[in-house]
Image: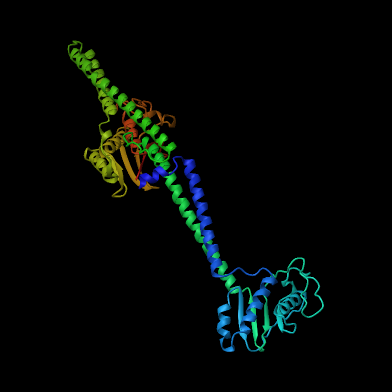
Amino acid sequence: MRTVLRRLLPDSIAARTALTVVVALLLTQMVSALIYLTDRGEAPPPPHGPKVLIQRVTSIAQLVETVPVSDRKRVVGAIDDPVLRVEWRRDPPRFEHRHQGMGAEYLIRRLRVALNDSDRAVIVEMRSDRSFLDPQPGPLTAGPLSPPPPPRDEPRWSERFRLSVQLSDGSWLLFTTGDPVEGAFRLVRFVLWMGGIAAVITLVSLWAGRRITAPLARFAGAAERLGVDGEAEPLPEVGPMELRAATRAFNRMQERLRRFVADRTQMVAAMSHDLRTPLTRLRLRAELVEDEEMQRKMLADLDEMEAMVNATLAFARDDARHEPRGPLDLAALLQSLCDDREDAGQSAAFDGPSHVTVQGRPVALRRAFANLIDNAIAYGGAVRVRLGRADGTARVDIDDDGPGIPETEFEKVFAPFYRLERSRSRDTGGVGLGLATARTIVRGHGGDITLTNREEGGLRVTVVLPV
């Protein structure tokens, strides 16, 4: 079913957006028409002028006069509606505002003509003669039953009023136009209907928009993962035509980058491995040198070269790179590293919560933090590790009591084989790969490493990892 719908839908973002707008508009029109037709079926539209009112009043009065007195209330109740309320009474009604202006006189004359009774008692209650918007209905002709000439523009009333017509037996019919209670209720109902329509259309539009933009969100997420995990799975090629083409190009780029990094890593690892053979031969030849001082210097150089080769091989190979990710208790990892250093007679202290869980590669993270802690001990004599959480991240501060480094060198020290001998002891070992390896591992987990000089002295290494 989903495949069929995918084939029927347009295959471009522009077409799908247009389709969403058109469907929303059609839905609005259909529901509006449904409401309009439903309201028309429930109650007829209000009359728009005295002519319609006179016709209805005349017809109702003539009908009620032909009905026996005992049945008149039942008949009037069936005729009554919210637009023109009808009530039958034996006694004449009491009106508070009888107004006999031009509009009321015009309406009375027309009713008497329609009822063919010039003496018929008709009472009209208006708040003012402005109930008729046309103040010039035209002069009335002489004679009780002669119809008045039609006005140039038939009057329309602008406010609610009542009129009573006396029947032949002396009873009265009371007509009231425009029930305000029903009008208010219909207005509220209309507002509720329109609010419901707007809510439905908004939800449909949001759902459609999310459906359209969901592949874009996945594409952005894959682009973000590319900088964190070069071994991430290819992005599924779904969505409109343009997005599928972009996804396909992105997957090809990711595969090319993966092959490029793998080829360069393999090349460096192979070179480092191959260097071991000539180094071994040089070591054997150095053993044959008779000058002891020269032999000592040669062996020291060979040891340094071999250490560099081994470190380079480990850095390039990155054995933990393909280690699977999983939940890791970062607090337990840091605590164990500090305990190992304390057991070895070094000064290392940990401060932080008992448990902070992150997703990562345990061996790789242990290697990264071990390098940072060992550097702090080697160059500062002691290390203090503090762990905390903030804004969805885990923050690790590693402080030492060493001399610190110039701020201009903060970025350079992360370069492979870079050693800042001006600010670090020359007696320490290492080939300059500790910080480079640590930052590579941390960035591979979506985090970063920064350096700052503490005001009280020493260097602070800050590691931030996503939780």
Q: Quadrant of residue 280?
A: top left
In the image, taking residue 62 as reference, residue 19 lies left or right, namely left
The quadrant of the rendering that contains the C terminus is top left
- Residue depicted at x 45% and y 49%: 208
Q: Nearer the viewer, residue 152 or 14?
A: 152
x, y percentage for residue 290? 18, 10
x, y percentage for residue 202? 49, 54
Q: Nearer the viewer, residue 74 or 198?
A: 74
Kindly tell me whether residue 260 is visible in this rendering: yes
Kindly tell me whether residue 457 is visible in this rendering: no
- Residue depicted at x 54% and y 63%: 37
| Coloring basis for residues | rainbow
From the viewer's perspective, is residue 304 above or below residue 382?
Answer: above
From the viewer's perspective, is residue 181 above or below residue 305?
Answer: below
Q: Nearer the viewer, residue 268 or 102?
A: 102
From the viewer's perspective, is residue 269 above or below residue 126?
Answer: above
Q: Nearer the viewer, residue 107 or 14?
A: 107
Q: Quadrant of residue 275?
A: top left
Q: How many marks?
A: 0
From the viewer's perspective, is residue 16 above or below residue 36?
Answer: above
x, y percentage for residue 233? 32, 37
- Residue depicted at x 37% and y 29%: 413
- Outermost residue on the top side: it is 290
In the image, taking residue 377 as reference, residue 207 lies left or right, namely right
x, y percentage for residue 405? 40, 31
